[in-house]
Image (cartoon, rainbow, N blue to C red):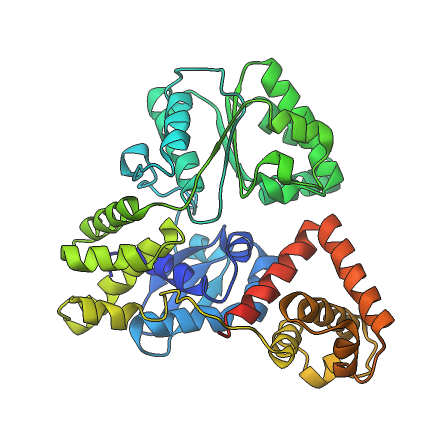
Amino acid sequence: MNSLDDIWSSVLELMGKEVTSVAITTWFGECRPLSFTEEGLTVLVPSDFKRSVIAARFMAPLKAALREIFSGEMEVFLVGEEALEEDGGKKADPMDPEEYTFDKFVVGPSNKFAHAACLAVAEGQTRNYNPLFIYGDSGLGKTHLLYAIRHEVARRNPDAYIVFVRGEDFMNELITAIQTGRNVEFREKYRSADFLLIDDIQTVAGKASTQDEMFHTFNTLYEANKQMVFTSDRPPSDMPTLTERLKSRLGMGLQADIQPPDFETRAAIVRSKSAKLGLALSNDVVNYIAENMTSNVRQLEGAVLKIRAQSDLMNLQLTVPEVTRILKDMFRQKSSYVPTPDDIIQETAKYFSLTSEDVKGQRRTRNTALARQIAMYSIRRLTNLSLQDIGDIFEGRDHTTVLSSIQKIEKNISTDPEFAQMIKDITANINARS
């Protein structure tokens, strides 16, 4: 393995098979690896709250990823900022890798326009692209482009005041500012920026106070002719819980989407990453990976990292059959898998730390009631069962009860982005059983 950061990147990539990209960004965005020994991996998690959530919900996939890379059991140690102070370490931006520059971004037809727009903004060629709004699915390079802008602007103008923040962190900072009476300091930080770069802006949708603050911050910077760049998993027009006035502001500049890379771009990404790691891959192997991994850049890079780890540990000949064995769990095979009601109930129960009997039974605690409603909704959406058939599964409930449950879930999905993400997480877990 080339470095501690490579190990961490590979761990997060492998976790993506069990955990959604949004969950990884939310809970691991501020984390960074501190050390790796025979005992295990030590990870810095600055927030006490996030440390407790990771310990409770994500230790199993963390350890599973390490087991897959190193073929053995490894511990994961979560530490706070005090660990840096004890070791005399320096705080650093955990998500500002030096390699996220324009010259290391592999350009292809799927991202050429977005890349060109970001480069023009960073080089100061135009102020017409304000705001610049980049959108696309997770793992396609949006964050890379934001950091590339940050690096290029800082290189050209060291005195520029650049603010880079994730949408969720903007919201959390605002909450803290309100609680501690530091609203003026908060506004000064954001409204005096020369460049405001916000990643995953969709996370502020549905948060009234945060959207209001964002709206006024936007107006202040726009009127001062300061550049803003936002990224999201969808265009502003597709965010139903975003206020109309903020939706209008975010969509008033240039919008550029990023699509999944084509075969040639995927192959170039594999070659670039393997060269960086000093890994020699034949054209047959490169083409094989590019043909079988089609979803995003992060998946391709994770594949190369896994090959490198296995090669270092076992001194393998990297032929196509050997690479197939190494990456077999990462390849997404086409499947006609249709989940059964039992599959759906089991995964829903597992998400809420319940049993299938709890979900199907008569318990009326808040958790079991919600899990039951989600299971009914998922069975209706993922199978061909009628409302009455679904009711029969849940200890003879009638079709009106099932319909009411489905309608409640649909309403929550349409009004609460976090709830909608939870449903996506559960659905992904269900489909992963294939």
Along the horizontal axis of the image, is 279 left or right of 432?
left
Q: Is residue 309 left or right of residue 399?
A: left
Position of 69 with respect to 345 (left or right) is: left
Which residue: 25% across, 51% down?
A: 270
Q: Quadrant of residue 72?
A: bottom left
Q: Is residue 397 left or right of residue 434?
A: right
Residue 158: tell me if it is visible. Answer: no
The residue under the point 55% across, 64% down is 428
Measuring from the top left, give residue 354's x and y in whole percent: 68, 79
Residue 296 vertical position relative to residue 145 in the rendered view, above or below: below
What residue is at 38 percent from the left and 36 percent from the top?
111
- Residue 103, image x, y percentages: 27, 34
| Number of numbered labels in the structure image | 0
The residue positioned 40% from the left and 59% from the top of the image is: 13
Q: Is residue 367 above or below residue 285?
A: below
| Residue 67 drawn at (x, y percent) | 36, 74
Closest to the observer, 194 or 103: 103
Task: Please say if 314 is above or below 32.
Answer: below
Rendered location of residue 208, percent (x, y): 75, 39
Pick the front one: 325 or 387: 387
| Of the pair 187 and 224, the residue shown nearer to us | 224
Q: Can the viewer see residue 298 in this picture? A: yes
Quadrant of the image occupied by residue 53: bottom right
Q: Quadrant of the N terminus?
A: bottom left
